[in-house]
Amino acid sequence: MFKTRTTRVTAAISALFLFSAAYIFNGSEVRDQVMLNLVTSSLNSVHYSPKNYSDDFSEKLFDMYLERLDYSKKFLLQEDVHQLKKYRLLLDDELKAGTVNFFDQSHTLMQNRVKQSEVYYKEALEKPFSFNGDDAIETDPKKLLYPETTAQMKAAWYTAMKYQVMLRLAQMIEDEEKKDSTKKFDLNSPRFAELEKEAREKVGKTNADYFSRLMKINRYDRYYIYLNCIANLYDPHTEFFPPKDKKNFDIQMSGQLEGIGAQLNERDGAIKVASIVPGSPSWKQGQLKAGDIITKVAQGANEPVDITAMRLDDAIELIRGKKGTEVRLTVKKPDGSILVIPIIRDVVVLEETYARSAVIEQGNKKIGFIHLPGFYADFTKANGRNCSKDMKLELEKLSKDKVDGIVIDLRNNGGGSLQDVIRIMGYLIPKGPVVQVMQRDKKIPQVYGDDDPNVIYSGPLAIMVNENSASASEILAAAVQDYGRGVIIGSKSTFGKGTVQQFVNLDEYLLPQFDSIAPVGAVKLTIQKFYRVNGGSTQLKGVEPDIVLPDVYKYITDGEKDMEYPLSWDEVRKADYSRWNASPNIQQLRTKSDARVKDEPRFRLIGEWAEQLKKERDITRYSLNLAQYLKERKMEKEQNKKYDKITEEKEMKISYASADRLLIESDSTKNDRHKEWHKSLKKDVYVWETLNVLGDWK
């Protein structure tokens, strides 16, 4: 995304200060009103497609928020929904007035119903379940109605708990049968009663954790959801970010954070260490291990803070901190011993988020392979790490190794920095436009391109994509395709996100009298649409690969066009560019690939699996008869065994780029991680076929 600041932002949001200042004189919640006004003003003054607050907008907002408030339809009663429906056509008026009466009522109702539901789930698990009947459960909330009475709500929780226990029990029975494969487990045996009780206890523990988290949801947690619904009605990528979420987004974009390098989760009401990031401060210190329970956190020699009943995100905030500072963790080890562990915080690099390369020999060809998981960039630092610098290094390393072709893997790459896409495309062409960007209220797009005539890599090129390749990934794939610079290989289409976002820090627009409510958060807004150099848009349609390979998710739609309220597709005039003078013969490559795919057993299995997944997705109602469920589960597992062949290893010789070999092999942690990655590449049929396509390139 572009890091730009339009004058419209400052002028328009500043205009609301006079309006916001009036709130200090009334009796309403100042924080609620100021936050609401900041969000709505930024949306309508900056968003690419501003909205009119009308009854239509009000209905959409009501429906979206109600669905997110109680998606499972197990908390609210029909009478609650009826009570809230009086606001269905009034939310636009509330937005204009800066009031949140609807939200207040919804929050109070939800809080009360959560407490009520906690009683119901516990009651359901008090006695053994009978799994011999012909009852069933509907798992698709869209097919359910809100319960009319508390008795129906109680019954819904009973059915939900029975289903969870049945799933757990089925797994336990299968584990028992593995111990003695000659015997079928007897559902009428005393052992069954023991397992059923154990399953209920485990389900009870899981739901106790779930309700513990629900009870920790405060008013502002839900208020943030409400603000996000307002934002999402503009388009799916326009979002409100509370301060903590914005910090996490920055970490994701930069691929690094300042902390201790421990992945944490909340289990059984405690903050537990899930894993340690290799090379991190925790890993180097050596005492903190996966499975440890953190009970207290101290900043250096200060008094420790007890975190035993704290929310996970609040605990993480205490543990994270600036490089060079000390945090002391009081932990309970699995053996029950208590230990205080001092750790000096440092920059934690999440290596898996960065570009990495390998050299793969297949047949008589030596192919360079680059995995780019995201178009990352550290916008918080002048010389922060970014993907274009890393990609330049990888391309240079592989070029020095004289590879016969290069594959850039953009599968599951959700995008990121637009400037870096332009730079990366510039490494592959002499000069020229890369993307066209349309501003709000403009009729002619602005063209962004590469002005540097130097080309780092000029050989055969393949770009791998799938249905989760989005935004910046689609720009690069589209530019390579339009220039004829390489061949695009993957599923039938990419995601279809053709928009650019910008963050607006709402704290910058607070009047001095509201400083006490800071930090407020930020809004990520869609400010531009981008277009291919051929004039078409990737919005909704995505990029259709030159060579389409069978895809497990072929029949499961989950792209931009399937999201709520996406911006429309359109096109602009073609930019002035010249195609690559050594473009591949796409038809020839496609013909050879199609023949190989037709004869490849793994691709045939992928086609069959896609059909099966479609059938399974359409089934949302499940029997609660255990014997029938076990029978169906056994048949499904037997049937699915054949799909294991999809990930059988193919013979490939994979090595490091020459420039990396000494560095990686001297670091056992890095070496192990790369070996695991190389192993996964050998099991990847899509990599295998992409290498074959480059092998056909003449």
Image (tube, helix red, strand yellow):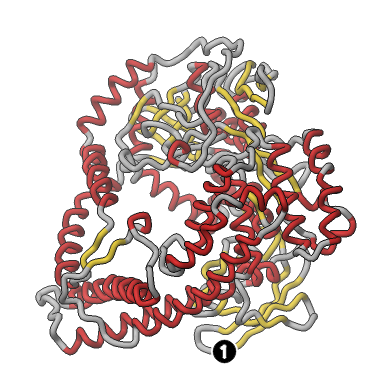
Residue 456 visible in image: no
Q: Which residue is mark 1?
A: 337
Residue 101, percent across and down?
65, 61
Above or below: residue 259 compared with residue 427 = below
Q: Residue at x 30, y 35 (%)?
A: 550
Looking at this view, is 137 or 433 the one in front? 137
Residue 604, percent across and down?
21, 38
In this rendering, position of residue 168 left or right of residue 506:
left
Residue 210, percent across and down?
48, 73
- Under mark 1, the amino acid is Ser
Asked which quadrant contains residue 183, the reply is: bottom left
Looking at this view, is 75 or 589 the one in front? 75
In this rendering, position of residue 558 left or right of residue 132:
right
Count of picture labels:
1
Q: Residue at x 49, y 54 (%)?
A: 673
Is disc 1 placed on a helix, strand or loop?
A: loop
Q: Residue at x 73, y 55 (%)?
A: 35
Looking at this view, is 527 or 383 the one in front? 527
